[in-house]
């Protein structure tokens, strides 16, 4: 007898296998688009962990993406191989999240969100100005991969897919664990959580470190893939906005949410770009407003509500 | 240099107060604030081009139009969503910014615009320094507006109502104050101040949609420095920022301007989240 | 544990909000297994005192000693993990989670480390839910249950932490007389089964009298009486505090 859980795992495995073989059937352009979708999903998972599950919105989380990208760039320019720089990038990002997180996560929601925006902006400025180390506003290059473009983008496609799967799986396990309960309690009622023996500061900082970890690796992959990065690009506030909208549309507080959201937003952007080039900002803005008003729980949230309502209706029928 | 810094700070003060009020009292971090400021600039631009009206006069129109826009936005979009929490209001105001930004881009393009006033070049002498007349006038007007805002808050019935709601929402409700109306007026006042600042800005400097993002950065800093919802705090914050920016530009080079601002803000947040004045956070 | 089984010592605890002395040099002791009623008119400082003891507010002065350990400077979560917990006057449920999940959280962070893994904690959570009689509601979302059930849930939540001392802050507020009766019976039963020490905060005299071994009375932040229910009821200072000078004189005249 197949339990719900086993069916879900089976479906997921099929999904992953489908994705692995997808590049054979679509053009290079779409492979690259989907790689970017995976990347956004990873960043959004980090945001989802902090905001969707814990109730602390890290508006400036893109700074970890930038950190990942730049540590990779700088490291490789010194001759270190990619395999070595990636952990370095991750560790740097984690250190940032701990050092900055300890003082700032003691403050409540509003302040944390704003503080992260400030940090992200400050980091952007620093990178723009530290021209000696970072190449300044002109950007910096990374070693070009000595393979054909097709092999390159397929390689990064698989790498991002792997990262997305690992990120989602990790966060799923975290949420199901005792630690995850602590995180959810913080969102539910932080004062009560404190009084029940939950060390909220520890939970908050660790959660942020986890989001920093995966976001920075996404940045590292991105930098190596693009071979050229600039500060405005990797510390872009639009990364933050996009990933938050992705979380909202996919459904905050669900593991599949960011993944679904990333696909929806990307496809939406493709359509909007080709149809409304001159108005794409306004259309994006209007779409966001519509989402926020009509689908606040996102796709997964709305489906979950629908399922629950159906269950209740069925239960009522049975009891009568 | 110091005088220029203070004159700039005056404008910043007016600008920061609007944002601070919206955040501190209405509880909304308005990421479209920058768009509203430059909208004020463009409104004055149009009045100048069409009717040859001096921005010091057309600013009244800016203020009024932005007041109405702010009220409309608050009533239709923000009020229903406040209970959703900060995620929604932040994203929503950002979406608004995108829409307004796009409109501005379409109508006026991304080019920098200026309003060329006949008396733009005149200076007057004050001791050793030559003070540009317009900057001085703008500073005076900004100062008057700040004071008027203060009087409004302290002396008028509506203003006192807003203060009451900020201090104790339930208490205010209990004595029959229409809380939502107070939040609405407060928010609209914020956007009006943005528009007024935009007009003043337009009389002196050039402007374009490029400024949008950095304005929001600046008003964040001012609001936090002064304590949310604190008028004189924001005024002081504005002056401080004006001085810090000018000094930074002179001593370190203009690229470090934004970084300085951000570093200041983060430091204040870490060390004294209630602002340098230490006033209570209304929220 | 110290002389006479004293499990909690509160020494000259004070909390000043500027010029306002919300708690003014309050001292008393609690023996293991006692139920101590903490009463006083509204605003006497009972909840503030609780907040001080549990670490939720910083103290202006004074010390709190729990099982010979000075907990005066510990954070709330540390104090809770040590075995001193409280319920809230205005219930603070974990919104968005079910009743069972709420109790489970308490169980996960309880005092006995052997039981704080997911499996054992879940087991204990279910036991406690049964104990307080919420089994039929365990899968309900906390936003869907009644106030008495919310209070039971909060009670279950703190019990799941296996506390030794429990501060019950105006647990009866908002309950009708039948519910108050039911709650009192539950508290007494649980106290016996779990060997709890309870500090029972109320501002309604009647609810507290029948259940307490000893009573401490606060008024304007100061302790005015500390004794058995009998002693307290007849104490004129207490009557004065609750009913005013006139009644106190009347009682005294009557004998």
Image (tube, coloured by chain):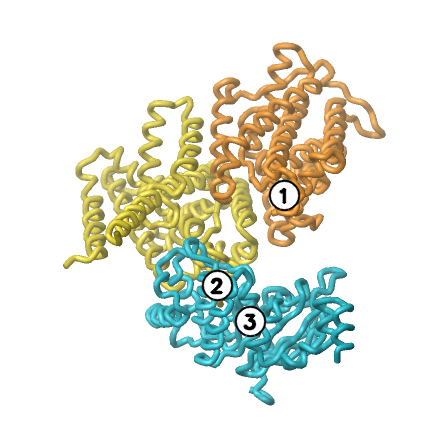
Chain colours: A yellow, B orange, C cyan
Q: Can you name the residue that lies furthest to the front here? A: C254
**Crowding at label 1, few (<14), some or many (≥20) Cα neighbours within 10 Å?**
some
Task: Tell me if I can see residue C6 in this picture.
Answer: yes
Subunit bearing disc 3: C
Q: Which residue is mark 3?
A: C167
**Crowding at label 3, few (<14), some or many (≥20) Cα neighbours within 10 Å?**
many
Give the image location of residue B124, x and y in percent. 81, 23
The numbered disc on residue C151 is: 2
Can you tell which of label 3 and label 2 is closer to the viewer? 2
The numbered disc on residue B173 is: 1
Can you tell which of label 3 and label 1 is closer to the viewer? 1
Taking depth in this image into account, of C117 and B14 the one nearest to the observer is C117
Taking depth in this image into account, of A130 and A243 the one nearest to the observer is A243
Give the image location of residue C243, x and y in percent. 72, 67
Labels 2 and 1 positioned on one and the same chain? no
Task: Tell me if I can see residue B219 in this picture.
Answer: no
């Amino acid at each position: 007898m197949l339990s719900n859980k086993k069916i879900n795992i089976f479906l997921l495995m099929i999904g992953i296998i489908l994705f692995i073989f997808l590049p054979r059937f679509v053009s290079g352009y779409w492979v690259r688009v989907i790689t970017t979708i995976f990347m956004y999903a990873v960043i959004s998972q980090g945001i989802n962990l902090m905001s969707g599950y814990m109730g602390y919105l890290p508006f400036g989380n893109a700074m970890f993406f930038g950190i990942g990208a730049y540590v990779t760039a700088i490291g490789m320019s010194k001759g270190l191989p990619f395999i070595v720089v990636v952990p370095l990038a991750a560790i740097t990002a984690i250190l940032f999240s701990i050092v900055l997180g300890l003082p700032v996560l003691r403050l409540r929601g509003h302040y944390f969100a704003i503080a992260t925006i400030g940090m992200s902006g400050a980091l952007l400025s620093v990178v723009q100005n530290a021209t000696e180390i970072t190449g300044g506003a002109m950007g910096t290059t990374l070693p070009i991969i000595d393979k054909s473009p097709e092999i390159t983008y397929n390689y990064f496609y698989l790498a991002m897919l792997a990262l997305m799967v690992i990120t989602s799986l990790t966060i799923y396990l975290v949420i199901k664990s005792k630690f995850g309960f602590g995180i959810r309690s913080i969102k539910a009622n932080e004062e009560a959580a404190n009084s029940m023996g939950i060390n909220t500061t520890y939970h908050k900082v660790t959660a942020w470190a986890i989001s920093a970890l995966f976001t920075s690796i996404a940045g590292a992959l991105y930098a190596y893939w693009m071979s050229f990065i600039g500060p405005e690009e990797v510390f872009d506030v639009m990364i933050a906005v996009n990933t938050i909208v992705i979380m909202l549309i996919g459904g905050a507080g669900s593991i599949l949410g960011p993944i679904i959201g990333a696909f929806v937003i990307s496809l939406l952007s493709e359509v909007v770009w080709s149809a409304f080039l001159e108005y794409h900002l306004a259309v994006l803005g209007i779409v966001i407003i519509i989402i926020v008003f009509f689908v606040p729980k996102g796709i997964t949230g709305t489906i979950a509500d629908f399922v629950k309502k159906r269950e209740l209706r069925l239960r009522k029928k049975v009891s009568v | 240099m110091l005088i220029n810094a203070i004159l700039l700070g005056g404008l910043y003060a007016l600008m920061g107060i609007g944002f601070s009020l919206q955040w501190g009292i209405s509880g909304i971090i308005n990421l479209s604030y920058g768009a509203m400021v430059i909208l004020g600039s463009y409104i004055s631009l149009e009045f100048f081009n069409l009717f040859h009206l001096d921005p010091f006069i057309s600013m009244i129109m800016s203020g009024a139009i932005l007041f109405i826009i702010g009220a409309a936005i608050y009533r239709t979009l923000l009020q229903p969503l406040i209970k959703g929490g900060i995620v929604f209001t932040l994203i929503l105001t950002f979406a608004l910014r995108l829409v307004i930004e796009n409109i501005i881009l379409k109508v006026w393009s991304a080019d920098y615009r200026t309003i060329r006033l006949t008396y733009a070049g005149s200076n007057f002498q004050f001791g050793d320094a030559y003070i540009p007349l317009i900057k001085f006038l703008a500073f005076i007007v900004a100062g008057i507006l700040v004071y008027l805002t203060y009087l409004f808050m302290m002396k008028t019935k509506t203003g006192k109502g807003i203060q009451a709601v900020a201090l104790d929402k339930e208490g205010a409700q209990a004595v029959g104050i229409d809380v939502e109306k107070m939040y609405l007026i407060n928010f609209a006042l914020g956007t009006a101040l943005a528009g007024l600042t935009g007009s003043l800005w337009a009389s002196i400097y050039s402007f374009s949609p490029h400024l949008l993002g950095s304005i929001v950065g600046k008003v964040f800093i001012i609001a936090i420095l002064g304590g949310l919802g604190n008028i004189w705090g924001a005024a002081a914050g504005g002056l401080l920022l004006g001085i810090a920016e000018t000094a930074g530009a002179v001593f370190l080079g203009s690229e470090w301007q934004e970084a300085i601002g951000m570093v200041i803000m983060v430091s204040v947040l870490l060390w004294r989240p209630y602002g340098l004045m230490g006033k209570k956070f209304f929220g | 544990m110290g002389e006479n089984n004293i499990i909690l010592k509160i020494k000259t605890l004070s909390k000043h909000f500027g010029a306002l002395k919300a708690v003014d040099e309050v001292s008393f002791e609690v023996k293991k297994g006692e139920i101590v009623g903490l009463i006083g008119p509204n605003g006497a400082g009972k909840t503030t005192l609780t907040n001080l003891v549990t670490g939720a507010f910083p103290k202006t002065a004074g010390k709190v000693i729990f099982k010979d350990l000075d907990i005066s400077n510990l954070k709330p979560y540390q104090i809770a993990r040590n075995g001193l917990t409280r319920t809230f006057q205005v219930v603070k449920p974990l919104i968005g989670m079910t009743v069972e999940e709420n109790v489970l959280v308490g169980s996960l962070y309880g005092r006995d480390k052997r039981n704080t893994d997911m499996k054992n904690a879940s087991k204990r959570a279910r036991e406690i839910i049964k104990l307080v009689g919420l089994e039929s509601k365990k899968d309900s979302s906390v936003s869907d249950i009644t106030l008495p059930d919310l209070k039971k849930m909060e009670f279950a939540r703190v019990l799941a932490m296996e506390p030794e001392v429990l501060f019950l802050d105006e647990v009866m507020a908002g309950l009708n007389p039948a519910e108050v009766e039911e709650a009192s019976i539950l508290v007494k039963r649980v106290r016996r089964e779990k060997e709890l020490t309870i500090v029972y905060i109320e501002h309604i005299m009647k609810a507290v009298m029948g259940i307490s071994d000893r009573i401490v009375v606060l008024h304007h932040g100061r302790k005015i009486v500390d004794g058995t229910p009998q002693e307290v009821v007849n104490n004129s200072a207490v009557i004065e505090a609750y009913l005013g000078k006139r009644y106190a004189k009347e009682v005294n005249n009557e004998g």
